Image: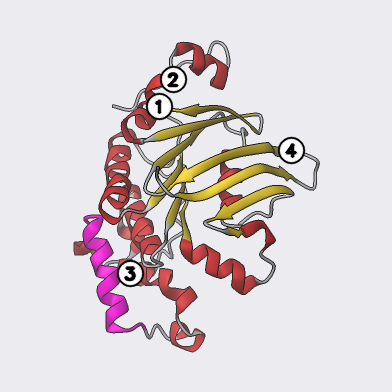
Amino acid sequence: MSEQVLRIKGLQKTYPNGVQALKGVSFDVKKGEFLVVIGLSGSGKSTLLRCLNRLHDPTGGEIFFYDQDVTKLQTSSEIRDLRKKIGMIFQHFNLIPRHTVLSNVLMGKLASTPTWKSMFGLFSDQDKEEAMKYLRLVGIADKAHIRADQLSGGQQQRVAIARALTQNPKVLLADEPVASLDPATCHTVMDYLRKVNQELGITIVCNLHFLSLVRQYATRVIALKGGELVYEGDPQNIDNAWFEKIYGAGAKEVHIN
């Protein structure tokens, strides 16, 4: 049996306005898998990912990262250390537009770089070579010295992946990583995420909207509806009946070719 990287037990999140985003969600994440989370907008997908690395504070339940219950972490340094091990990429890239691609990737090293060095951009040659290694991995090393705002959306997302990899994470969370991209670019970004998963052995937990992408890239899938887990299993087993249960009667599947 594969080692469990994450064990989520009865996870709850209630926002100050009373909205219950997660209502006792439980599942495991195995080392090396590409787990995809699906569900309607507002089902709790993004909240779930943000709880896993404490961008959001859960209001109940447990999240074990190996043997550590991350819901118990109190100090900013503890949480910062967790986020080095559980990296994250976002729908909107979060790059610094006027900085070069290489500079943006090196930002992933900030948590492990002395503040005075990071203020002056004094990264070591080793840091720079590592950043270039990950830019090569995502096929964009030739863009290292141009400004990030000169790149296409798909290229910017690949920069964001390389930036997250410089933290040397055990798990990479991807929150709707292709939602801002055109259909032709979606597969390019997803192919590089799969490459990270398979070649580097990094466990990936990814939110996606399109089932056609889920069936192509996920090794396993969970579905949320109204903050509750309603499906867990093989993406190929999501038939029309399951699709309607997850997305509602009358929902139409949109394919990304």
Q: Do the residues labelled 2 and 1 touch (CB within 8 Å)?
A: yes
Q: What residue type is labelled 1?
A: Pro
Classified by dominant secondary structure, the portion drawn in magenta counts as helix
Q: Residue 20 carries which label?
A: 4
| Residue hosting label 1 | 235
Q: Which amino acid does label 4 sit on?
A: Gln
Secondary structure state at the residue bearing disc 2:
loop
Specify the farthest residue to the bottom.
116
Q: What stretch is highlighted in magenta?
A: 123-140
Task: Kindly report which numbered mark, 4 or 2, lies closer to the viewer in this rendering.
Answer: 2
From where the camera sits, is residue 174 visible?
Answer: yes
Residue occupied by mark 3: 100
For marks 2 and 1, give the CA distance. Answer: 6 Å
Sequence order check, earlier mark of 2 and 3:
3
* Figure label count: 4
Measuring from the top left, give residue 92's x and y in whole percent: 46, 50
First in sequence: mark 4 vs mark 1: 4
Q: Which mark is residue 238?
A: 2
First of labels 1, 3 by sequence position: 3
The CA distance from mark 4 to mark 2 is 26 Å
